[in-house]
Amino acid sequence: MSANASYKNAEKDVELFTGIRVPSKTQQRLVHRQTFELPQSEQTLEELSADGGKIRIRTPRGEECRWLDYKGVRLHEFATGACFQDNQQLIDWVRQQPLSSPLICLGDGHDGIWNLIKPMAPETQRREILDWYHLMENLEKVGGSNRRLNRARALLWKGDVDATIALFEDCQRKQAKNFCVYLRKHHHRIVNYEYYQSEEICSIGSGAVESAVKQIDRRTKISGAQWKKENVPQVLAHRCAYLNDLLTL
């Protein structure tokens, strides 16, 4: 219950359902005494996606609260893992799994996500794909002519990066120049999305991990929640164990 609600509310629910009062502080201590292992797959895994989330860190009275990053990985159709300032934990977990070749790796354009994914499998095994929906979000930031944006969207849907860059070459808008830099940076991750989707080769978006991060946040971002920095790894492990159906009798 405390993996899905605040310790205070879990105290109420336990007493309601069992007639036994387990104080919230006791529940917290019990959680932090546990070891929550991430699961091991018996089936070959073909896709993963990675994303980041934020968690509110408790600060001394009178100081502004801080939001720090954590990372989440979703092994599609299998399990969710999350870590706080310890990427190696997630890297080791993924590398212990039976992974297909190629392994589809999906993410948005942030360097931190691809730096996390890179050591999970050799370059010859990874097939990195830039999330289609984030690609479109960045295209919309360019603004300007709708006709040009629609043309760019059609070109990118087929994975034609060079033609898309040429489309914006005469555009002096800073947003257009930034978008061209973005396209060149992720050129190798932009695929023929139309073909991949029509042939059902793999996912073209990182929605699986974005959904997983939202599920984690449903526990960590409840109203008023603040966490001691040293407790965050266990809080994330506890929530992932719940999401992975590992908290069973």
Image: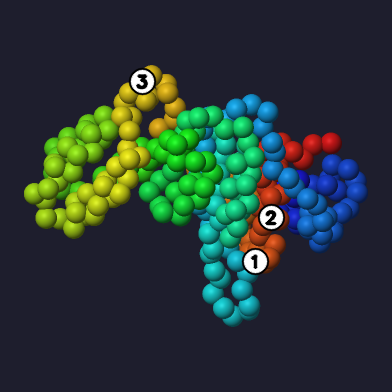
At label 1, the amino acid type is Lys
Examine the rendered structure and indicate whether residue 210 appears above or below residue 70: above
In front: mark 2 or mark 3?
Answer: 3
Residue identified by numbered label 1: 229
**First reached walking from the N terminus: tag 2 or tag 3:** 3
At label 2, the amino acid type is Val
* Nearer-the-camera pick, 59 or 122: 122
Q: How many numbered marks does the figure carry?
A: 3
**First reached walking from the N terminus: tag 2 or tag 1:** 1
Dot 2 falls on a residue whose secondary structure is: helix
Q: Could you say where residue 52 lies in the image, as x and y percent from the top left?
A: 50, 52
Q: How far, Cα to Cα, is label 2 from label 1?
A: 10 Å
From the viewer's perspective, tell me whether residue 233 is left or right of residue 188: right
Can see residue 69?
yes
Q: Could you say where residue 142 lies in the image, as x and y percent from the top left?
A: 22, 49
Q: How far, Cα to Cα, is label 3 from label 1?
A: 45 Å
Kindly indicate whether the residue at mark 1 contacts the one at mark 2 (C-beta within 8 angstroms): no
Dot 3 falls on a residue whose secondary structure is: helix
Examine the rendered structure and indicate whether residue 186 appears above or below residue 157: below
Q: Residue furthest bottom?
A: 62
Q: Could you say where residue 247 lies in the image, as x and y percent from the top left?
A: 77, 40
Dot 1 falls on a residue whose secondary structure is: helix
Q: How far, Cα to Cα, is label 2 from label 3?
A: 40 Å
Residue identified by numbered label 3: 198
Residue identified by numbered label 2: 235
At label 3, the amino acid type is Ser
Kindly indicate whether the residue at mark 3 contacts the one at mark 2 (C-beta within 8 angstroms): no
